[in-house]
Image (cartoon, rainbow, N blue to C red):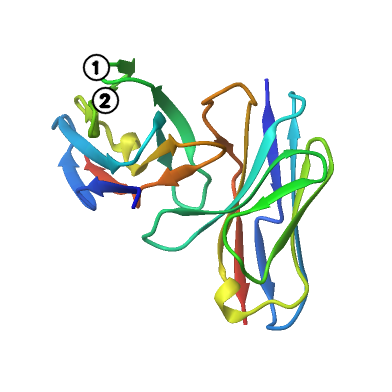
Amino acid sequence: EDQVTQSPEALRLQEGESSSLNCSYTVSGLRGLFWYRQDPGKGPEFLFTLYSAGEEKEKERLKATLTKKESFLHITAPKPEDSATYLCAVLRGYGQNFVFGPGTRLSVLP
Amino acid sequence: SQTIHQWPATLVQPVGSPLSLECTVEGTSNPNLYWYRQAAGRGLQLLFYSVGIGQISSEVPQNLSASRPQDRQFILSSKKLLLSDSGFYLCAWARTDLNQPQHFGDGTRLSIL
């Protein structure tokens, strides 16, 4: 069965303390992997798309990487405003088969 | 630039009442449109998607229905709400080019009493 998992479920960091979030997937026919940021009470905000193993994307303090089985979202020197839930999603097979992971809730303390 | 509007932001409804949530997209034409439900601590569950006017695909059989009366308008409905319909409902759009990301509205928090 196609599945997307994320770890850890929650992460607390001190401001400036770099870390990584993991998104593991077991799907057939991966067509793309997407990272989103979601603030409480809001819809997910698109961050990155990765299409093939070895691909990397960067935006400010965030860097996303992709292998054949997982993706990492690296956060360098995070700030309190980076606190949010980070979701990953995969598009697989035919049609509009998006599958979302449960998310990682990140808290960055000043 | 493209924008997506979803309303209302919050809604409290009694069990057995009807439902209509509306979503509109601006700045693009012929988008793919989606309705999701998000339960606390869980991933987004795809409910319906549409690739064109009048074309609706249902992912999960349930008490809800969707319609697309205009190119950039997507409506989620129910004739009789159940307690289990409570949740956070999100509308999203995506370009029809292959493998494009989805872009979400700010959601509707639905509480059933």
State the mark number for residue B69: none
Quadrant holding the C terminus of chain B: bottom right
Examine the image and state in which quarter residue B70 appears: top right
Residue A92 percent across, percent down from the top left? 43, 36
Label 1 marks a residue whose chain is: A
Residue at (74% x, 78% y) in the render: B80
Mark 1 = which residue?
A54
Who's the residue at 69% across and 76% down the image? B81
Residue A42 drawn at (x, y percent): 52, 47
Above or below, comparing residue B18 to residue A90 in the picture: below
- Kindly identify the amino acid type of the residue bearing the numbered disc 2: Leu
Classify mark 2: helix, strand or loop.
strand
Image quarter of the N terminus of chain B: top right
Q: In this image, B74 relative to A16: left or right?
A: right
Residue to which mark 2 is pinned: A66
| Disc 2 and disc 1 on one polypeptide chain | yes
Secondary structure under badge 1?
loop
Packing grade of label 2 (10 A; few <14, some 14-19, many >=20) is many
Q: Are marks 2 and 1 in contact (CB under 8 Å)?
A: yes
Q: Is residue A71 above or below residue B35?
A: above
Q: Residue furthest right?
A: B69
* Dot 1 amino acid type: Gly
* Left or right placement of residue B36 versus residue B77 in this view: left
Given residues B19 and A89, the one toward you in this image is A89
The picture places residue B34, in percent across and down from the top left corner, at 63, 45
- Crowding near pointer 1: few (<14 within 10 Å), some, many (20+)? few
- For the residues marked 2 and 1, what is the alpha-carbon distance in whole angstroms? 6 Å
**Count of numbered circles on the image:** 2
Q: Which residue is located at x 16 percent, y 29 percent?
A: A16
Left-right relation of B63 to B40: right
